[in-house]
Amino acid sequence: MNSKNIELVNQYFAHFNNHDWEKMAEMYTETAEFKDPSLGKGIVTQTREQTVQKYSELNEVFPDLNDNVIQIYPSGEKHVIVEFVSSGTAPDGSEFKLPICTIFTIENGKITKDFTYYDNFEE
């Protein structure tokens, strides 16, 4: 099971780095649970369409949006923890590099939960 989940996560990041938001969103269940500072506090339910919209808008601001996977940690039958660095360049030339950790819950070949952690304090 772990190898299938790792394959799925690798495919997820391939879709992300190709900016193929539709294919990436298809990897989630129709509605999935997210924990992400950009969506507010606590757990938020998002549809695939909302996921496509979120990343399409982010991609408009950062056309070279990219996630560099540092390490993948399989955990049990349903979870994969991924450590990665997200980066991009805004039109004004300002760049960001953000270390992120995401815990994916995978059931029946689909992502049901995406709990993402990063430092969202302004420097």
Image (cartoon, rainbow, N blue to C red):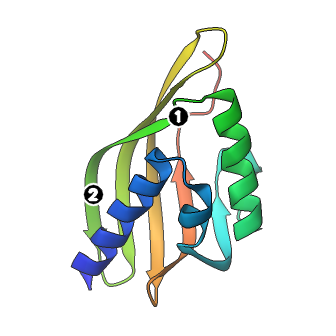
Q: Is label 1 in a helix, a strand or a loop?
A: loop
Residue 41 horizontal/vertical position (percent): 75, 52
Q: Return the residue at label 1.
A: 65
Specify few, some or many for label 1: CA neighbours under 10 Å numbering under 14, 14-19, or 20 or more. Answer: many
Query: On screen, 66 above or below 115?
Result: above
In-image side of 106 versus 21 (left or right): left
Query: On screen, 29 above or below 9?
Result: below
- Say if residue 47 shows up in the picture: no
- Say if residue 104 shows up in the picture: yes
Q: Return the residue at label 2.
A: 72
Q: Residue drawn at (33%, 61%), measured in percent from left and top?
A: 10
* Quadrant position of the N terminus in the picture: bottom left
In-image side of 72 versus 67 (left or right): left
Residue 117 horizontal/vertical position (percent): 53, 48
Residue 67's image quarter? top left
Q: Residue drawn at (44%, 61%), measured in percent from left and top?
A: 12
In-image side of 69 versus 119 (left or right): left
Q: Residue drawn at (52%, 26%), measured in percent from left and top?
A: 88
Real-space CA distance between mark 2 and mark 1, rounded to the nearest whole angstrom? 20 Å
Residue 72 horizontal/vertical position (percent): 27, 57
Query: On screen, 52 above or below 75?
Result: above
Q: Residue drawn at (47%, 47%), measured in percent from left and top?
A: 18
Residue 123 horizontal/vertical position (percent): 60, 15
Specify few, some or many for label 2: CA neighbours under 10 Å numbering under 14, 14-19, or 20 or more. Answer: some
The amino acid type of the residue labelled 2 equals: Ile
Of 25 and 83, the residue lying toward us: 25
The amino acid type of the residue labelled 1 equals: Leu
Q: Between disc 2 and disc 1, whose residue precedes?
A: 1
